Amino acid sequence: MIETMLPNVDWEKMWEATTETLYMTGISVLATFVLGLLLGLLLFLTSKGNIWENRFVNLVISSFVNIFRSIPFIILIVLLIPFTKFIIGTMIGENAALPALIIGAAPFYARMVEIGLREIDKGVVEAAKSMGASTSTIIWKVLLPESMPALVSGITVTAIALVGYTAMAGVIGAGGLGNLAYLDGFQRSRFDVTLVATIIILIIVFILQFIGDFITSKLDKR
């Protein structure tokens, strides 16, 4: 029955493309979480009235974040071709998509981290300072725990965006469901291949959203 309705779908290829998409998304989400968290913390801590207030450093980091957050992803991939070839050695395959995915998503998540940190009641931070807490203690015991629901919600949104980015990266040969949908589906007029690839991408997005919402609801004590 399925073979009749979807005659052009090679399920082995579809499974391989799905694992490539999951691999690209998983690695880039982990790297984005770490880099975005660091950038977001630096943006917050160096801003006016905070522990490491430094206008110049804040301006440099803010400019970096704004520039890379504003470049359309498909253009960013092209701009990063020399860098990607230097780091990875090739522009083809799922690993070749990782630099662009991470550099494109980390600044986006950094802004979400900064927003989450700004929502923390300043009285909580001041109370920790008055008790002689060190900067590292304030970061690990106050800022991160208090902003955790916002951080998880932010990385969920970013992860979903990254699934879309992997599909765009696939168009220029990075592998995954986007690559299969474009080359094997669209270019060869096989609508069923494009449809199945799209449905699988939607399923991945729904699962990511469900997991993110579940964790956020468990962490949110309000």
Image (cartoon, helix red, strand yellow):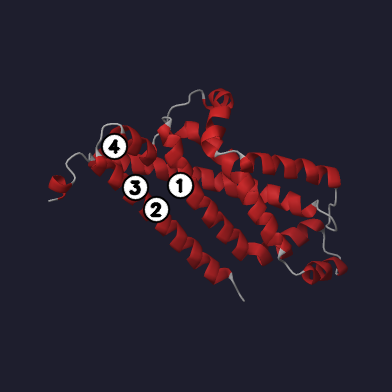
State yes or no: discs 3 and 2 in contact (Cβ < 8 Å).
Answer: no
Q: Which residue is mark 4?
A: 185
The amino acid pointed to by label 2 is: Ile
State yes or no: discs 2 and 1 in contact (Cβ < 8 Å).
Answer: yes
The amino acid pointed to by label 4 is: Gly
Among the two numbered marks 1 and 3 on one chain, the one whose residue lies closer to the N terminus: 1
Quick one: label 2, few (<14), some, or many (20+) residues within 10 Å? some
Please give the name of the residue rendered at 79% of the width and 68% of the height, measured from the top-left corner: 122
Q: Which residue is mark 2?
A: 204
Task: Please identify, in this view, whether the residue under mark 4 or under mark 1 is nearer the observer.
Answer: 4
Q: Which residue is mark 1?
A: 163
Among the two numbered marks 3 and 2 on one chain, the one whose residue lies closer to the N terminus: 3
Q: Is residue 171 left or right of residue 213?
A: left
The amino acid pointed to by label 3 is: Thr
Give coordinates of residue 197: x percent, y percent: 32, 45
Q: Nearer the viewer, residue 188 or 44?
A: 188
Q: Nearer the viewer, residue 150 or 164?
A: 164
Secondary structure, mark 3, is helix
Q: CA distance from mark 4 to mark 2?
A: 19 Å
Secondary structure, mark 1, is helix
Quick one: label 4, few (<14), some, or many (20+) residues within 10 Å? many
**Residue most toward the bottom?**
222
State yes or no: discs 1 and 3 in contact (Cβ < 8 Å).
Answer: no
Q: Is residue 199 above or below residue 103?
A: below
Among the two numbered marks 4 and 2 on one chain, the one whose residue lies closer to the N terminus: 4
- Quarter of the image holding residue 20? top left
Q: Which residue is mark 3?
A: 198
Secondary structure, mark 4, is helix
- Quarter of the image holding residue 56? top right
